[in-house]
Image: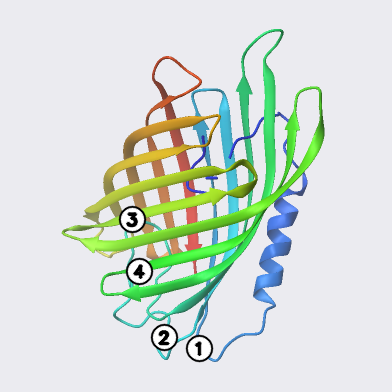
């Protein structure tokens, strides 16, 4: 159903005009927070995922890492050059972020195909704990959304939002596990990736990473399993990391196999 971020369900062809403005306001609020004595690391990310069951997922996020220890956010010992598209942090850090998303899907059946959609907002906070060649992070927040369905009044939903990530350099590459939980629909999403470097330009302006991906997601009304490949593109001079993924998907709403593809752009500075 979704990518790394309901990473829930949604339907409807009406995309919220407030999605961009919500993200911009969230960025302004985070940037205006009092700055600690140590260097912060800001992040901006966005992307999309398209699924074969006529479903689509769009997301955006702004956030900030506040170092809580005595080390710089880029000091050796943390994750100086992550291979999976996340900020480098070398000290125990407070992670504040706000995510927005729009997820839609179709439910076929008589007398007509039903459109469903969720416009969501997830403010959250947590801790990132670095260790040698990796980190663990745990976050908790609030999941808010407006639910749309064909011929049904708009419904406001609220629940708990939980998120975790485990990153570890392993062999020639790096392993990354990400998961979250959306409380108002009891929805769990889990994603595991292993990416290895495959090429780097002589001037180190661009580097490519490649590897497999497995995804499992669902709740008591829907579940899906996905498997495919991931291509990561690191652009250090632009402080950017691009991710392209795609593969096969099988879900509880289809008898056969379908496909999925996604894209994301992560910037940290």
* SS type, badge 2: loop
From the top left corner, tell me how far across and down residue 261 is, in percent.
44, 34
Q: How is the image coloured?
A: rainbow
The residue carrying pointer 1 sits among few (fewer than 14), some (14 to 19) or many (20 or more) residues within 10 Å by Cα, namely: some
Name which residue lies at 52% across and 30% down. Answer: 222
Task: Give the numbered dot on residue 38.
Answer: 1
Q: Are marks 3 and 1 in contact (CB under 8 Å)?
A: no
The residue carrying pointer 4 sits among few (fewer than 14), some (14 to 19) or many (20 or more) residues within 10 Å by Cα, namely: many
* SS type, badge 1: loop
Q: Which residue lies under the disc numbered 2?
A: 72
Question: Label 3 to label 1, Cα distance in Å?
Answer: 27 Å
Q: Residue furthest top?
A: 111
Task: Give the numbered dot on residue 221.
Answer: none
Q: Are marks 1 and 2 in contact (CB under 8 Å)?
A: yes
Q: Which residue lies under the disc numbered 3?
A: 176
The residue carrying pointer 3 sits among few (fewer than 14), some (14 to 19) or many (20 or more) residues within 10 Å by Cα, namely: many
Residue 213 or 138: which is nearer the viewer? 138
Disc number lying in front (1 or 4): 4
Disc number lying in front (2 or 3): 3
| Left/right of residue 191 with respect to residue 57 in the rendered view | left
Mark 2 or mark 3, earlier in chain: 2
The residue carrying pointer 2 sits among few (fewer than 14), some (14 to 19) or many (20 or more) residues within 10 Å by Cα, namely: some
Q: Are marks 1 and 4 in contact (CB under 8 Å)?
A: no
């Amino acid at each position: 159903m979704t990518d790394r971020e309901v990473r829930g369900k949604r339907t409807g062809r009406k995309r919220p005009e407030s999605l961009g403005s919500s993200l911009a306001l969230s960025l302004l609020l985070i940037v205006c927070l009092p700055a600690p004595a140590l260097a912060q690391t800001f992040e901006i990310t966005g992307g999309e995922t398209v699924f074969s069951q006529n479903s689509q997922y769009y997301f955006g996020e702004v956030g900030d890492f506040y170092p809580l220890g005595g080390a710089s956010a880029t000091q050796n010992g943390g994750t100086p050059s992550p291979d999976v598209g996340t900020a480098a942090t070398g000290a125990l850090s407070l992670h504040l972020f706000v995510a927005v998303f729009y997820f839609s899907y179709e439910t076929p059946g008589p007398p007509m195909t039903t459109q469903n959609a969720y416009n969501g907002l997830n403010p959250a906070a947590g801790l990132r704990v670095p260790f040698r060649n990796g980190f663990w992070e745990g976050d908790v927040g609030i999941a808010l959304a407006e639910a749309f369905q064909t011929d049904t009044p708009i419904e406001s939903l609220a629940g708990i939002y939980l998120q975790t990530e485990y990153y570890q350099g392993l062999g020639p590459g790096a392993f990354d596990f990400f998961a979250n939980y959306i409380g108002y629909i009891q929805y769990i999403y889990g994603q595991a990736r292993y990416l290895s470097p495959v090429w780097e330009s002589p001037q180190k302006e661009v580097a490519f990473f490649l590897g497999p991906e497995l995804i499992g997601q669902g709740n008591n009304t829907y579940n899906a399993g996905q498997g495919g490949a991931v291509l990561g593109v690191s652009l250090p001079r632009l402080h950017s990391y691009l991710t392209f993924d795609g593969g096969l998907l099988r879900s509880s709403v289809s008898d056969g196999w379908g496909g999925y593809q996604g894209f994301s752009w992560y910037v940290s500075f």
